[in-house]
Image (cartoon, grey):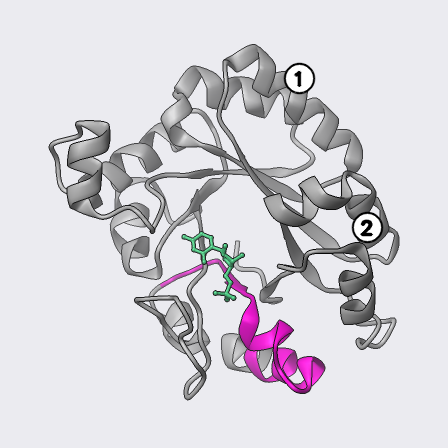
């Protein structure tokens, strides 16, 4: 299930920024990119159509969480856009995740967010009244996502082993917070290098600023890609 291309997080505020970023890559270099809420809400579905028209693959990171019927209808719209992968919050429940799968169909990958990595164990206990450990909660949600026949979860690289043990080797673990050796962690707290992420069994890595803010983004991409596949 491992994807050889690191997913590049297109965390840009406008269409123009995306265009100028992508134009630096040779035409035949087909990327896998992540489009998040900011860009999608600013530009709209057109951004997905544009990126797809260039032949790139798209992970649309919108983290849906609503009643099953609404999520199912929204997923049908995203399927029509041709997204390669998208996601929901596992906290929406098994019924919602099943409805999401139904709406999206089998042509795109569907993964779940378990606990956001910005949530601490204390916050989870206080805000969500979940009294288990954070890892137990993450693993519980991953099992629910597997039960709903989702393809995997977004998770911290540190949680991959526990999740795969509780689900299956084939269950996708997509991990952000990746930094090549020697680069700035920025606001990421617990980072891993592409090589470490591979070693612990991540299937997809998401890399943003080390590529998008690099002096030479194409070179940064190739270096990270090589480290991820070494
Ligand atoms: O620039 P950087 O490599 O930190 O970007 C990582 C991307 O992955 C961002 O779009 C960020 O929102 C996203 N992400 C994350 N941690 C999570 C989930 C998503 O960094 N747990």
- Based on the picture, tell me whether residue 213 belongs to the magenta stretch: yes
Q: Which residues are magenta?
A: 201-224
Which residue occupies 80% across, 54% down?
51
Q: Position of residue 107 (x, y in %)?
A: 69, 35
Q: Position of residue 164 (x, y in %)?
A: 32, 48
Q: Position of residue 187 (x, y in %)?
A: 39, 67
Above or below, 177 relative to 124: below
**Along the polypeptide, which appears first: circle 1 or circle 2?**
2
> SS at mark 1?
helix
Above or below, 125 relative to 178: above
> SS at mark 2?
helix
Q: Which mark is residue 73?
A: 1
Q: Which mark is residue 205?
A: none
Left/right of residue 208 with respect to residue 16 in the rendered view: left
What number of labels is visible?
A: 2
Which residue occupies 60% across, 43% down?
37
Which residue occupies 36% across, 74% down?
196
Above or below, 26 relative to 43: below
Q: Image quarter for residue 13?
A: bottom right
- Label 2: few (<14), some or many (≥20) within 10 Å? some
> Residues at badges 1 and 2 in contact (C-beta under 8 Å)?
no
Provide the residue designation for mark 2. Answer: 52
Left/right of residue 207 with respect to residue 161 in the rendered view: right
Left/right of residue 25 with respect to residue 60 in the rendered view: right
- Label 1: few (<14), some or many (≥20) within 10 Å? some
Residue pushed farthest top? Answer: 69
């Amino acid at each position: 299930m491992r994807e050889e291309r690191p997913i590049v997080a297109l965390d840009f505020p406008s269409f123009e920024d995306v265009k100028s970023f992508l134009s630096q890559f040779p035409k035949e270099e087909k990327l896998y990119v992540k489009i998040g809420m900011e860009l999608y809400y600013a530009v709209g579905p057109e951004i997905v159509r544009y990126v797809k028209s260039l032949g790139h693959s798209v992970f649309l990171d919108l983290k849906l969480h609503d009643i099953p019927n609404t999520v199912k209808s929204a997923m049908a719209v995203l399927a029509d856009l041709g997204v390669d992968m998208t996601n929901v919050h596992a906290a929406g429940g098994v019924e919602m995740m099943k409805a999401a799968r139904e709406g999206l169909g089998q042509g795109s990958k569907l993964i779940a967010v378990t606990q956001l990595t910005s949530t601490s164990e204390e916050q989870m206990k206080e805000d969500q009244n979940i009294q288990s450990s954070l890892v137990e909660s993450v693993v519980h949600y991953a099992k629910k996502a597997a039960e709903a026949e989702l393809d995997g979860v977004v998770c911290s690289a540190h949680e991959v082993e526990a999740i795969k043990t509780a689900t299956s080797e084939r269950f996708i673990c997509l991990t952000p917070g990746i930094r090549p050796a020697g680069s700035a962690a920025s606001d990421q707290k617990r980072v891993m290098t592409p090589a470490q992420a591979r070693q612990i069994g991540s299937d997809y890595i998401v890399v943003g600023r080390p590529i998008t803010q690099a002096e030479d983004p194409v070179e940064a991409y190739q270096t990270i890609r090589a480290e991820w596949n070494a």
